[in-house]
Image (cartoon, rainbow, N blue to C red):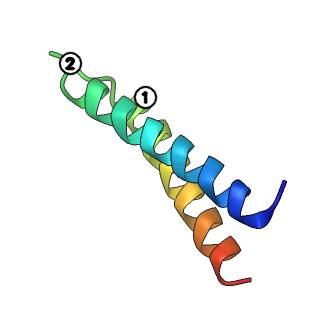
Amino acid sequence: MTLQSRIETLKDRHATLETRIADEDHRPQPDPQALSRLKVEKLRLKEEMERLRTQ
């Protein structure tokens, strides 16, 4: 897998997490633990993308 394809894969996963966070947040009673896990994972992906871009 090339560096660029890895970054694209991470972007796709990041976008999926954004959707899942929005879906959870719009539920009548969002699960705070689920939101927290999703946000941490989204941040981890963002940091990984930045790390790869600076290589």
* In the depicted structure, whether residue 17 falls above or below residue 3: above
Residue 24 x, y percent position in the rendering: 30, 25
Q: From this viewpoint, which residue is outermost toward the right?
A: 1
Q: Tell me if 43 is positioned left or right of 30 in this view.
A: right
Instruction: Say which amino acid is labelled 1.
Output: Ala
Question: Where does label 2 land, which residue?
Answer: 27
Of residue 6 and residue 18, the one placed in the foreground of this image is 6
* In the depicted structure, whether residue 24 falls above or below residue 53: above
Of residue 1 and residue 37, the one placed in the foreground of this image is 1
Q: From this viewpoint, which residue is outermost toward the bottom?
A: 54
Q: Tell me if 4 is positioned left or right of 38 in this view.
A: right
Q: Tell me if 33 is positioned left or right of 52 in this view.
A: left
- Quadrant assignment for the C terminus: bottom right
Residue under the point 43% across and 46% down: 39
Residue 50 x, y percent position in the rendering: 58, 73
Question: Where does label 1 land, which residue?
Answer: 34
Residue under the point 64% across and 77% down: 53
* In the depicted structure, whether residue 45 falls above or below residue 21: below
Image mark for residue 5: none
Residue 52 x, y percent position in the rendering: 69, 72
Q: Mark 1 touching mark 2, by CB under 8 A?
A: no
Q: Disc 1 and disc 2: Cα gap in Å?
A: 12 Å
* Viewer-nearest of discs 1 and 2: 2
Residue 42 x, y percent position in the rendering: 49, 49
- Of the image marks 1 and 2, the number of the one nearer the N terminus: 2
Describe the element under mark 2 as helix, strand or loop: loop
Within-10-Å neighbours for mark 2: few <14, some 14–19, many 20+ = few
Residue 32: name its quadrant: top left
Describe the element under mark 1 as helix, strand or loop: helix
